[in-house]
Amino acid sequence: MESSEAEVYLNSLINKTLRVYATDSRMFVGTFKCTDANRNVVLALTHEYRQPSQKQLEAAAASSSSGTVKAEMTSRYLGLVVVPGEHIVKMEVEEFVSQMKSKSALGQRALYV
Amino acid sequence: MDDGFPPPPSMSHPGIVALDITDKFASAVKTLPPGQIVKDGHFTLFESVSALEIMDPKMDSGCLEEGESLDEEYDTARDLLPEEVLGIIDQLLCLELTSSHQDGLAPRLPFVADHFDQRLCGGASEGSQRASELDDILRDSASQAKQPKFLFVLRAYCAGMLRGCHCVNEVVKDELYYEEEDFVTNTYDRNFLSHIEMAEVIALLQATRADLRELSNDVPKDLALALDLRLELRIAFLRAMELFPLRKSNPDSLKMPWIQMKELMKHFKKQHALAKAVPEAFSTKMQRRLASTMPPRPIVHLSFDDTYTHFEQMFQDGKDAMDVLKYVDPQSLLHFVSTFQARNPQPLVFIRTMTQGLLFKDMIVLGHHSIRRILDDDLAIVVLPSARQLDPANDTIEVPTDPRHQLAVQMETFRQRAAECYLDLYRIFCQNRCRVRRTLCHSIQQWDHLQADVEEIDGLLQVCLDEKSLTTSMGNIGHSLPLSSWAYLYKLRQMEWIVQLGFELDVYQPDELAGMYWYLNYLAKTRAQHGDRIKTFVLREFTAAQESPAWSQTKERNYTRSIAYIRVTMLDAACTWEFADGLCCLYTVLQRLNLVKTPSRPYSNDEQRYEIRMKPFVNIGLPQLPSFDDFTKATAQPETSITELLKYAENAVGGAKKGYEALSRMNDLQTFSVGCHDRWLANIKGCQKSTIFAGLAITTLQKAIETEGENAADLKLKVELPQPGKGYHDWWIVPKLTPKSES
């Protein structure tokens, strides 16, 4: 990716809601505020989500009647956090389905021009 | 989560999709040159400093160690033996104290509370469930059969404790304290049973005690008693919290729960041996479930013996604090607050904020008096006994040309200007010692302005009163200027406190002691002279009033009281002045003999250091800060020989000793220490003891010089300065001179 293009892309993500997965399988959901060359990511208004623990899974399995097990991720509010780049395993951006449709329409129009 | 934090976003909303951007993001940031950042325009790097760093165990409370599981290893439904219940309760006691302890590292009440949270609900619970907790405990008799047998005791205890913690938190939050430094009021969004009436919790505790008695066959007698007394403590604590806002009641009845708690504590100490510890019931893991924008806090472990000592002290302080309500006069009140807070160890922040509440809640002083009453009482003692200015009847005169009307108006202007500064004095003393000193440094600037402002009011008042200036054998000494005199006296006293607290808090280096004692002597001397000026004018009024036909016994009493106050103030100032002077000379000699060493300070010179040290005083108009040259000359006294200096020191310290002796013989009314005379006297005795040991040090030095001459190496003396808090009095650092052993 070109440097200028990369910057435009990163800037387009600013203030979007990101889901950052850390090496210890926690997920942080917050508003993207800042990043640098080492992929350190600053998120504001962040919530931490944790995979259900073994015990909770067992409990959920015991109470579920069907074959699939459903357990809630536990969450708590953390506020402003920085996730160091080295601890990031996966990143996702949240998009509204409705806006994605219009975006792709714009993209198509750009193709015709 | 009822307030403060935003609700967690829904993870699986059909209108939102999450797109994986891991690779694209990674390759995009790789193109950024080192040091460059991409950020939101409104986001500052300054803000980012406060961000919690994920995966850093010191910052991230959710960070798990290798192989560690988030699950609590402790099973809250397990059966507990009664001695284990006792063990957990005692452990909770220890933790409760760390939370209300003033030590900056210690306060972690909310976090500790969360262990009870689990206990209360018989399992981990979050937000909404909690509202019904107490109802559960109260009504859940059916499920109680299934529960571990003695859990109900623990639950009731925890309910009482949580409600108590809530009260403490509210008391502290209402008054002036320093967050984090003194106390942490953050409750991690837990509500600590705040929605439940205190009476209900007390009823629950009572009911639990009754249930416990019914089980007496299943529990050894002494163990049942131990549990019972711990429940009683919770009730007493809640009672104390319920009672203390009723400041109008008899202070002795407000003391009752505190006395009761102190007695209970004595039993606890003996009973603790019966308890069986359950360390696995306590872990820091609970923090990981708490909403927190702050780094994790470790648990502080306090031994049961320490806990006992602290609790005992706290209950004693709580009891003594109630005496503040026994108001006699504002000077005694000020002495009460300042000596109470000077206790070592200083009362906990909870007690200190409670004292503030007792003093000022709802702007009613001590539950009875208006601020005006206190202020007028103080003026009447210090400068204006039976003065026309303070006659409440002036308020009723509505004719604007009548001088009495003008007096009322001017005095009201004065009160509005002075009230805040004046009340702040009491509040300042309720802070931790370092803050007392630092806040006083700001306060004297306020008083300096106040003095200048009220001098104008004085000018207007002397026209209304048709006051003549006074000429004595010293020449014309002007008008009495009572209001600004009053402000000046308080300002001087505060300046002395700042220097004295500097000694107490170990602010000064050994080689600075001579200079700082010289400055203290300068301030005290100024205060004594100012006291003399006030006395002259009070005596003039006294003589004039005696000749007037309106002379009465009340007036005589007021004048005598005022004269007594000035006398004790001048005596106190003279003692400080003499003793400080003596110590200054002693330290100067020690420095000349090189027995107190000056450390090398390559990055500053004496003048720069003087500037910084005296910064709080440099803007004060009166008394003006001496110039550096004057200060150095006055401290080092280069023209005076060592023998003369020591002779002088001996006399000064001897004079101070006699002064303190005289003070210690005076009663509480004469010294304006009604209600706190024992503490006041202990303070004077401490000073007196310090003068004796200072005298000894001077004699030792004189003898050594007589026999060995003025060469430091020949003297074979070792100078030891007491550790902070270990001397005879914290404000008087007296060196100890011992012969050096030949080695």
Image (cartoon, coloured by chain):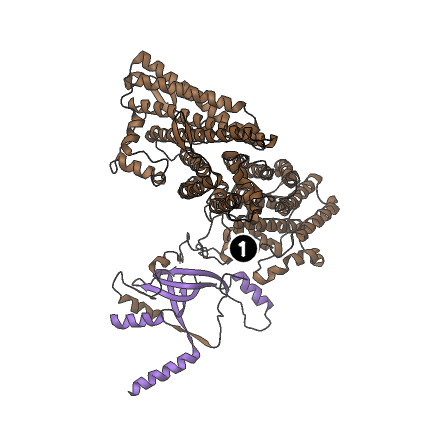
Chain colours: A purple, B brown
Horizontal side of B610 relative to B520 (left or right) equals left
> In this rendering, is residue B454 above or below B701?
below
Q: Position of residue B610 (x, y in %)?
A: 30, 36
User: In which quadrant is the C terminus of chain B drawn?
Assistant: top left
- Considering every residue shown, the one lying at the far bottom of the view is A112
> In this rendering, is residue B99 above or below B591?
below
Q: How crowded is mark 1: few (under 14 residues within 10 Å), some or many (20 or more)?
A: some
Q: Which of A3 and B595 is in front in this view?
A: B595
Circle 1 sits on which residue? B72
Q: Nearer the viewer, residue A63 or B242?
A: B242
Horizontal side of A34 relative to B387 (left or right) equals left
Does the rendering let one see residue B303? no
Q: Where is residue B474 in the image (x, y as percent from the top left)?
A: 39, 26
Q: Nearer the viewer, residue B220 or A1?
A: A1
Horizontal side of B14 relative to B141 (left or right) equals left
Q: Where is residue B335 in the image (x, y as percent from the top left)?
A: 52, 34
Give the secondary structure at mark 1: loop
Residue shown at the point (30%, 13%) measured from the top left: B708
Question: What amino acid type should be assigned to the residue bearing mark 1?
Answer: Glu
Does the rendering let one see residue B114? yes
> In this rendering, is residue B644 above or below B446?
above
